[in-house]
Amino acid sequence: MENKDFWQVLKRLGIEYDEKKAQLLKDFFQLLKEENEKFNLTRIIEEEEVYWKHYYDSLTIVEAVNMKDVQKVCDVGSGAGFPGIVLKIFFPHIELYLIEATAKKTKFLQMVIEKLALECVFIVNERAEEVKKREYFDLVVSRATAPLPIIIEISMHLAKKNGKMIYYSTNISREINLLGNKTGLALIDKKRIKLPDNKGERVLICIEKNKETPLAYPRNYAQIKKKPMF
């Protein structure tokens, strides 16, 4: 098992792993490296960087939620499969939906699912605000997809009542504290995560959904962009 420092840090996070998971990550990296230019997936392609800035970064979610208690997960704006595919590898019990509006990237995601033989993973090639699975997911996640006011509105209808929404960001604006009762959302935590070896800092925005999303949300994208909800 290579990348010993990586696995040691995961152990400190309480994340269980084995040779099968290690091999799946390795195979995922090979696909990413081989197909990156064709599908325009990521600027981070060196192996060590991928392990820390994509894999580890995706897994920091365990600092905010117990993944063993989660069943249905939605990754909005999945792109190359972060964090969704990584979460599926480490928590194979989840039912995972990857929402990605770019058809070219969904082809890559399908390739990954087939090559890694991942089960109960579904790709949705639509804009998040148009996805009809309202009030369905225990956990909605999104990583560096759009500014917080936008990504929250286009995805909040997907989380079920009492579900959680976790957004990976590189910063946090004060406006996040303006989330109001009209949306049924409550900010429950803001976790600052430092990547090892000074590889950067992340913020996990943790939101709980206290009631069903009003049918007026999400608005169409032009309205959301013109007048964000906070």
Image (spheres, rainbow, N blue to C red):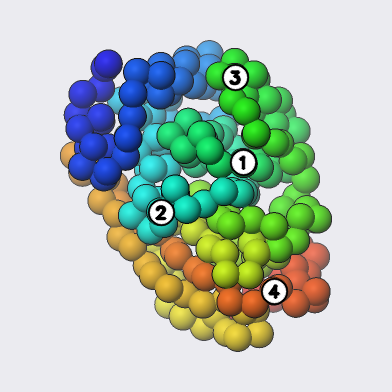
- Viewer-closest of 13 and 27: 13
Left or right position of 213 against 28: right
Instruction: Tell me residue 98's x, y (percent).
Output: 65, 41
Counting residues from the start of the chain, the first of labels 3 and 2 encountered is: 2
**Disc 4 to disc 3, how far (Cα)?**
35 Å
Residue 106 lies in what quarter of the image? top right
Is residue 37 at all visible to an observer of this figure? no
Q: Which residue is mark 1?
A: 96
Instruction: Tell me residue 148's x, y (percent).
Output: 54, 64
Q: Which residue is mark 3?
A: 117
The kind of residue tagged 4 is Glu
Could you classify mark 3 by the number of other residues whose Cα lies within 10 Å: few (under 14), some (14-19), or many (20 or more)? few
Counting residues from the start of the chain, the first of labels 1 and 2 encountered is: 2
The kind of residue tagged 1 is Leu
**Disc 3 to disc 2, how far (Cα)?**
25 Å
Q: Tell me what residue is drawn at x 59 percent, y 19 percent.
A: 117
- Dot 2: what SS? loop
Instruction: Tell me residue 184's x, y (percent).
Output: 62, 79
Figure check: 225 above or below 182: above
- Viewer-closest of 162 and 154: 162
The kind of residue tagged 3 is Ala
Q: Tell me what residue is drawn at x 32 percent, y 35 percent.
A: 16
**Disc 1 to disc 4, how far (Cα)?**
21 Å
Counting residues from the start of the chain, the first of labels 4 and 3 encountered is: 3
Q: Which residue is mark 4?
A: 212
Instruction: Tell me residue 87's x, y (percent).
Output: 48, 39
Q: Which residue is mark 2?
A: 66
Q: Nearer the viewer, mark 1 or mark 2?
A: 2
Q: Tell me what residue is drawn at x 48 percent, y 31 percent.
A: 89
Could you classify mark 4 by the number of other residues whose Cα lies within 10 Å: few (under 14), some (14-19), or many (20 or more)? some
Figure check: 3 above or below 60: above
Is residue 16 at all visible to an observer of this figure? yes
